[in-house]
Image (cartoon, rainbow, N blue to C red):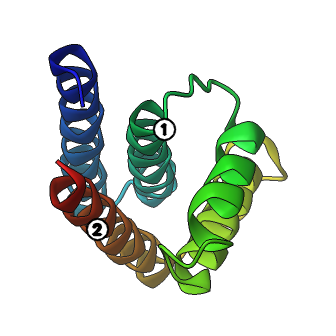
Amino acid sequence: METEQKQAISLRIKQAQETLVEARLLWEHDLWRGAINRSYYAMFYAVLALAIFKGEILSKHTHAISFFDKEFVKTGEFSKEFSRSLHYWFDERQSSDYGEITDIEQSEAQTSIDAAIRFVEAVSAYLSDQA
């Protein structure tokens, strides 16, 4: 892997980790809709790091999710659980950002953070193993 590619991957993982911190801070201030948003985005940034690893440049969420499924889940490098989680939190983020305004439970926001932590940690570990 080239130095420039390693740096770009590192920056995306750092972005994912910082976004997890944002999610936690929002949760601590009872801003659960924002916590879900930031949790999903942490996962999205981790997928973008995987895309860099594979030499791809992605910007659209649906393309990133399809890429993850095709390149990493279908091949068995990541379990289907991670795919389901990414799809689910993408949908929840879409609903909470653009859908009808509904109450969001504290526990749902916490679950999104927990899922994002697992996802980002798994991607970070995978990329570290590949270096």
* Amino acid marked by disc 1: Lys
- Residue furthest to the front in view is 1
Q: Which residue is drawn at 48% across and 38% down?
A: 54
Task: State whether residue 92 appears in this view.
Answer: no
Task: Report helix, strand or loop for mark 2.
Answer: helix
Q: In this view, does 111 lie above or below 125?
A: below
Q: How many labels does the image show?
A: 2
- Residue furthest to the top in view is 4
Q: Mark 1 = which residue?
A: 54
Which residue occupies the foreground of this view, 102 or 111?
A: 111
Task: Work out whether mark 1 precedes mark 2 in sequence or the reverse, and give the earlier one.
Answer: 1
* Amino acid marked by disc 2: Ile
> Are the residues flagged by discs 1 and 2 in contact, CB closer than 8 Å?
no
Within-10-Å neighbours for mark 2: few <14, some 14–19, many 20+: some
Q: Residue at x 38, y 67 (%)?
A: 119
Task: State whether residue 81 appears in this view.
Answer: yes
Q: Left or right of 94: which side holds 103?
A: left
Task: Report helix, strand or loop for mark 1.
Answer: loop
Within-10-Å neighbours for mark 1: few <14, some 14–19, many 20+: few
- Residue furthest to the right in view is 100
Q: Residue at x 41, y 56 (%)?
A: 39
Which residue occupies the foreground of this view, 100 or 3?
A: 3
Q: In this view, does 109 lie above or below 52?
A: below
Image quadrant holding the N terminus, namely top left
Q: Which residue is drawn at 31% across and 52% down?
A: 23
Give percent across and percent down for residue 101: 75, 53
Q: Mark 2 = which residue?
A: 117
Q: Left or right of 120: which side holds 48?
A: right
**Quarter of image, res 89:** bottom right
**Quarter of image, res 50:** top left
Badge number at residue 5: none
